Image (cartoon, rainbow, N blue to C red):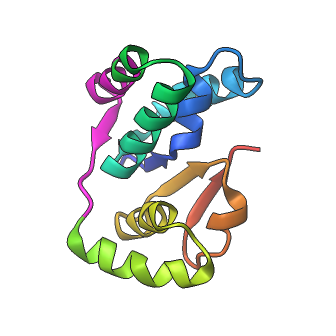
Amino acid sequence: MVAVILIDSNIWIFANIEEYPENSSARKLIINATKEQIAINAIILSEVFHKLSVLTNVEKAIKAIENIIDSDYVVYLPIEESTISKALYLTKKQLRINDAIIAQHAKDIRCKLLSDNAKDFNKIDGIKLLKFR
């Protein structure tokens, strides 16, 4: 059985901005993750698009999202209504709603979550967190 890894938006952003000191490490982690099944969802895609459109421009952000979606190594997994309902309760742990949905989605699909946001995701019981740094 192939393991699934949900890659958080911050890793995708690092990998797409060459000037970031984290760029090389993020790119290597994504390449290494192709040995597993990489998962993506609408929240992560939305966050990546928004940040890249601000840091670069809309055209580059669109291209980056298309590259992620079109990759043979990335599978899009929709977020179920029940995941969002459970995520609302995670916000009581002082998580932003997007982070709560990402965390709950990782739990619901029983996958690892690769993120640079250990401070927030460590608040969630039962999450299989892979820390970027």
**Rendering quarter of residue 61:** top left
Q: Position of residue 65 (x, y in %)?
A: 35, 27
Q: Is residue 103 left or right of residue 46?
A: right
Q: Residue at x 35, y 63 (%)?
A: 109
Q: Residue at x 42, y 15 (%)?
A: 60
Q: Position of residue 5 (x, y in %)?
A: 46, 48
Question: Can residue 117 be seen by looking at this rendering?
Answer: yes
**Rendering quarter of residue 125:** bottom right
Question: Can residue 38 be seen by looking at this rendering?
Answer: no
Q: Position of residue 115 (x, y in %)?
A: 61, 49
**Rendering quarter of residue 86:** bottom left
- 112 falls in the magenta region: no
Q: Is residue 76 left or right of residue 104?
A: left
- Viewer-proximal residue, 115 or 63? 63
Q: Residue at x 41, y 75 (%)?
A: 87
Q: Is residue 124 left or right of residue 20?
A: left
Q: Residue at x 30, y 22 (%)?
A: 66
Counting labels gives: 0
Instruction: Using the image, determine if residue 76 lies above or below residue 89.
Output: above
> In which quadrant will I find the C terminus?
top right
Q: Position of residue 69 (x, y in %)?
A: 29, 29
Q: Which residues are magenta?
A: 63-79
Instruction: Using the image, determine if residue 128 lies above or below residue 36.
Output: below
Instruction: Using the image, determine if residue 83 lies above or below residue 5.
Output: below
- 75 falls in the magenta region: yes
